[in-house]
Amino acid sequence: MANDSVSIHGIWASRWIFILAATGSAVGLGNIWKFPYMAGVYGGGAFVLVYLICIAMIGVPIMLAETVIGRRGRQSPVNAMRSLALQSGASPRWSLAALMGMVTGLLILSFYSVVAGWSLDYIIGMGRGEFAGIDGAGAGARFGALTADPWRLTLWHSLFLLVTAFIIARGVVAGLERSLRIMMPMLFVLLLVLLGYSLTTGHFGDGLKFLFHFDLAEVPDGILAAMGHAFFTLSVGVGSIMVFGAYMPKKSSIGATVMTVGLLDTVVALTAGMALFPIVFAAGLEPGGGPGLMFVTLPIAFGNIALGQLFGLLFFILVAVAAWSSAISMLEPAVAYWVERSGRSRALVTGVIAALCWVVGMGTVLSFNVLADARFFVSDADGWHLFRWTTEGGKTLFDSIDYLTSRIMLPLGGLLFAVFAGWVMGRDVVRAELSLRHPWMFPVIYWLLRVVAPVGVTIVFVAELLK
């Protein structure tokens, strides 16, 4: 029988709020600066097809696993996995997987808020018209000046994290749900407005050709990239989806809901590509990926096309909204856990945890300037060094945290969640929570959850370590 309990933190008004929350968690900076470019260089439509298969076989099953664990446990990820492990006769140490996920989320948030804060600076810059007629050298210099200024980075890092904490502190209904009801429709509307504008540039066809040309020859090189992005894009492995699942109404269908989230995440990424690359081509620029696309290439494009200032402003507002919708999902698991553990008020717990994130995030701020020469994992003529002051080689603190979380902790967390749901909780428990309308679907989904998804994540895990 499905669990009838309700989370002490609250419950979503409907399954659509869960969809907004999970989609908001999944839709972040990577959807805008990574996936569209990957599709363009790895075979266009052929890559998208491979990616959708990977989403169905890796991303969605792990998201299902997290949602099932969360709704069954009705607690924070750590306590949910502990109680469900005990109910299944397994070791309560399984909760350590959720604890690792919680720490992963906080570490990611510590540097994510710094990078997301750049978009706030660019909102001001676009509003002031700083990018009008700007060239490549000017755009690069402006971005370099931003990252070289620790005071500006600290300001935007602090503001971004403060707003994130304010939303979380207000609670599941008054904070998370109310903000998602505003942010997610705003994100979709802004994206559609930018798409409409790209239709007027005269280069919409070039953007579509870049994104959707069908080149099977490029696909083999992109299979691993498709597998990795299918895992990372859905925000699994940190417990965000698990804690959102704990707030899901009992009557909601987990299967249909999670598949809707996977589809929306992909649609947003493709729409972002269709909206942005025609603008890049209209300015006579070459498409690119990563932060350079967002903070150098696109500002040049917006600064040199008609109505660019207005739509550049809307674009960076879109980026900020997408970043906030992801950031709140990283903070919520830790806040839920410490509220349950300490019995303290949500506002106090949120403030303390956000302050810790802020302190760690200051390491990222300084790694772009004052501490740029403080490098970890340095290999040079003198041998291998855990830490060294040097201008070459090694990783900055930002690079080190990014490597640790994205290449080790995230895939390991996703793997453990899938194994727990598929091999520890029990077949009947998973079947009861999924409540699939068509009985024939369960054996397929259960096989994906128990076998295919863990194997896929293991491949991604090993491949990321070997990069």
Image: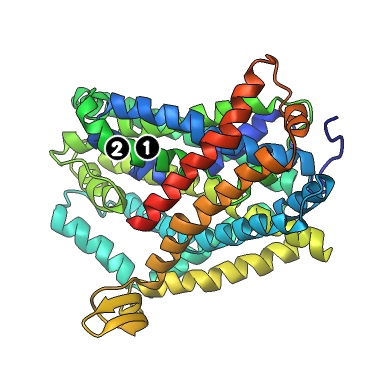
- What residue is rendered at 35% in x and 56% in y? 466
Residue closest to the eye, 262 or 148: 262
SS at badge 1: helix
Between the residue at mark 2 and the residue at mark 1, the CA separation in whole angstroms equals: 6 Å
Figure check: 361 above or below 417: below
Kind of residue indicated by mark 1: Ala
SS at badge 2: helix
- What residue is rendered at 73% in x and 46% in y? 172
Q: Which mark is residue 452?
A: none
Q: Position of residue 75 (x, y in %)?
A: 78, 49
Question: How many residues crowd mark 1 within 10 Å: few (<14), some (14–19), many (20+)?
Answer: many
**How is colour applied across the structure in the image?**
rainbow
Residue 181 visible in this rendered orientation of the protein: no
- What residue is rendered at 40% in x and 45% in y? 30
Q: Position of residue 456 (x, y in %)?
A: 47, 40
- Tell me if 356 is positioned left or right of 342 in this view: left
Q: Position of residue 190 (x, y in %)?
A: 43, 34
Residue named by callout 2: 222
Residue named by callout 1: 226
- Tags 2 and 1 in contact by the CB under 8 Å rule? yes
Kind of residue indicated by mark 2: Gly
